[in-house]
Amino acid sequence: MRDLTLNITIPEAYREYKVNREFKELLQTGAFVFVDGKYILNAEAYISTATNEGLQLTDYAVEVMSDCALVFESKVTSVRFDSKDADFLNLTPEEKREKKYISTNQSELLPKEIIKQREKSKEQFAEQLKYKKTCWQRIFEILQTNNAKSSTFHDKTLLNSDYYIRAKNNNSPAPSVRTIVAIAAGYDLGLPVTEELLKLAGHAFNPTSEEHDAYIFILTSMHGQNIDIKNELLIKDGFEPLGTKSRK
């Protein structure tokens, strides 16, 4: 009998993300968010943002969880996940279990929801272009929505206050990819909004960049985690942490 589960940890998800193209492409659509240890379809019926506690499952989502959450198969494997993990023989029984995303009966629902999410993102971006906002202007608009202040901006993003001033004053040049990702990671903006900001600054994620790939995983899968935890993942993979100066 197959051992199927809806639950997965961030380390397990990141291992799967790096080796499973179907799972990676699914997350990169931005159609799923990571909530309560599960990947949930990002639709109003299942996800609520009505509280100040971040993303929450709706009562309906709890009732129909198998309809809105990705399904994984959990099984024992004798193969190391990658060279950066501990020796397999020293792992605990639970650590030896590999969780692999499997296709489910969601196949008919997902394309419709993914298209819906993408179209919504495009409409939002087109709306912003009407007003000819720069990337910094759009960032400052988002910061105001999040009640950000110069004094709290660094704690959220690990960027120094100069970047907050640049956004407020709409200073040139446009922010870099790393700056945009630091702000997006710090304020949990998600993948669609991050891509919107990148476009406004004349950037885009490079599909052949392993570092950018790690950024996308953070944006899609680590909502609610502070930037220090997100940086731990980057550092473990050999990438520079986000921010102008990370906390030690």
Image (cartoon, grey):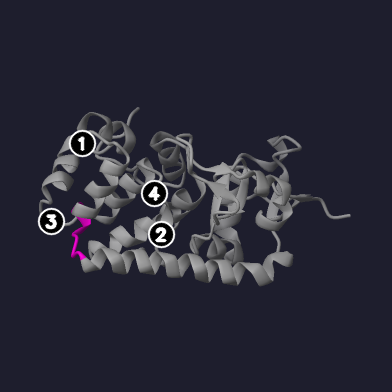
| Residue labelled with disc 1 | 160
Q: Earlier in the sequence, mark 2 or mark 3?
A: 3
Q: CA distance from mark 2 to mark 3?
A: 23 Å
Label 4 CA crowd tier, 10 Å (few <14, some 14–19, many 20+): some
Range drawn in magenta: 131-136
Label 3 CA crowd tier, 10 Å (few <14, some 14–19, many 20+): few
Q: Amino acid at mark 2?
A: Pro
Give whichever of 17, 131 is nearer the camera. 131
Q: Amino acid at mark 3?
A: Pro
Residue ID at (51%, 68%)? 116
| Residue labelled with disc 2 | 192
Q: Earlier in the sequence, mark 1 or mark 4?
A: 1
Number of on-image labels: 4
Find numbered disc 4 in the image and state the secondary structure of the residue it sits on: loop
Q: CA distance from mark 1 to mark 4?
A: 19 Å
| Residue labelled with disc 3 | 173
Q: Quadrant of residue 59?
A: top right
Q: Amino acid at mark 4?
A: Leu
Residue contact between numbered discs 1 and 4, judged by CB atoms under 8 Å: no
| Residue labelled with disc 4 | 189
Find numbered disc 3 in the image and state the secondary structure of the residue it sits on: loop
Asked whether 46 falls inside the magenta stretch, the response is no
